């Protein structure tokens, strides 16, 4: 190819070539529907690289994510729905319109005023009709969803005055789980506890999905260390007491933390 491969035009021309009659059979076969799993997968792989702090890998994963956008835009273009230029124009217009403090003469004191203005502009656009909680995709992970709706409610003052109240709520919900009289009550109270923990994470500026992904990864590494160490020592984890397993777990924690 003659194009500079460091340009957007080169990228999109490659996508178009892949979708052309003499392009790639797999790429030509794809539809908006068939690409859904790949969009989700690439988004989560990008999140994983952010968790890992691997900037080289992040550069690659952002490209993979961009490919999904390019394929969807090309499919839409082929069917006459819209073109990539429309995608770019709409986001550029939105960025300018929703940042009047940057591209206009509006003055703001801090990021909180930015968010207030953002919501007012959305309302003027007709993007918010009935509720602040409308327009949030229902299929995003529940932990992320809980933090988003809490953030939106906080914009109109429906929030605790300080984090002490949030932590008291966590303790209250934990106690209610202990006092639940049947399974259905336990399910309900457990959901309330997770929601309260999500709120606490929001107050501490912790992205809960990321925190849980990291906790899952720590458990995976430690448990795999326990399995590998048991095999090397010729012992079966099934035959170890809970006390012995706990000692092995602590060893796994020390070793995996040292490796990181």
Image (cartoon, grey):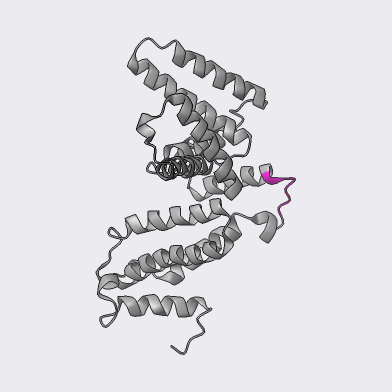
Spot occupied by residue 62 in the image (x, y as percentages of width and height): 50, 63
Magenta-colored span:
106-111
- Decide if residue 102 is on the left or right side of residue 74: right
Q: Nearer the viewer, residue 180 or 247?
A: 247
| Residue 208 in the image, given as x and y percentages of width and height | 53, 39
Vertical comparison of 100 with 172: above or below: below
Q: Main secondary structure of the magenta part?
A: loop
Query: Which of these two is toward me, 247 or 125?
Result: 247
Residue 69, compared with residue 11, is above or below; it is above
Q: In this view, does 21 lie to the left or right of 165?
A: left
Residue occupying the point 48% across, 57% down: 46
Residue 155 showing in the rendered view: no
Q: Quadrant of the N terminus?
A: bottom left
Which residue extends farthest bottom? 2
Q: Residue at x 63, y 21 (%)?
A: 165
Q: Residue at x 48, y 47 (%)?
A: 126
Say which residue appears at 67% left-offset and 26% top-offset.
Answer: 162
Image x and y of residue 97, in percent: 59, 57
- Quarter of image, res 72: bottom left
Q: Quadrant of residue 171?
A: top right
Q: Position of residue 22 (x, y in %)?
A: 26, 83
Q: Is residue 168 above or below residue 217?
A: above
Side of 219 relative to 234 (left or right): right
Residue 189 highlighted magenta (yes or no) = no
């Amino acid at each position: 190819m003659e194009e500079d491969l460091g340009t957007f035009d080169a990228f999109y021309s490659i996508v178009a070539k892949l979708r052309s009659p003499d392009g790639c059979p797999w790429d030509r076969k794809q539809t908006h529907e068939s690409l859904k799993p790949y969009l989700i997968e690439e988004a989560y792989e990008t999140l994983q690289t952010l968790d890992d702090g691997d900037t080289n890998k992040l550069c690659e994963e952002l490209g993979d994510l961009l490919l999904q956008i390019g394929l969807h835009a090309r499919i839409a273009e082929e069917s006459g729905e819209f073109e990539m230029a429309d995608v770019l124009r709409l986001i550029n217009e939105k960025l300018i319109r929703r940042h009047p403090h940057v591209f206009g003469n509006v003055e703001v004191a801090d990021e909180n005023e930015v968010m207030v203005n953002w919501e007012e502009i959305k309302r003027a656009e007709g993007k918010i009709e009935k509720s602040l909680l409308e327009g949030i995709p229902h299929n995003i992970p529940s932990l992320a969803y809980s933090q988003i709706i809490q953030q939106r409610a906080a914009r109109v003052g429906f929030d605790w005055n300080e984090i002490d109240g949030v932590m008291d709520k966590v303790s209250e919900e934990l106690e209610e789980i202990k006092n639940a009289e049947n399974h259905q009550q336990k399910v309900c109270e457990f959901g309330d506890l997770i929601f309260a923990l999500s709120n606490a994470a929001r107050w501490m500026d912790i992205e809960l999905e990321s925190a849980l992904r990291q906790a899952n990864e720590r458990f995976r590494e430690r448990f795999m260390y326990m399995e590998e160490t048991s095999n090397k020592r010729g012992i079966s984890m099934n035959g170890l007491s809970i006390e012995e397993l706990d000692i092995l777990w602590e060893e796994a924690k020390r070793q995996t933390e040292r490796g990181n």
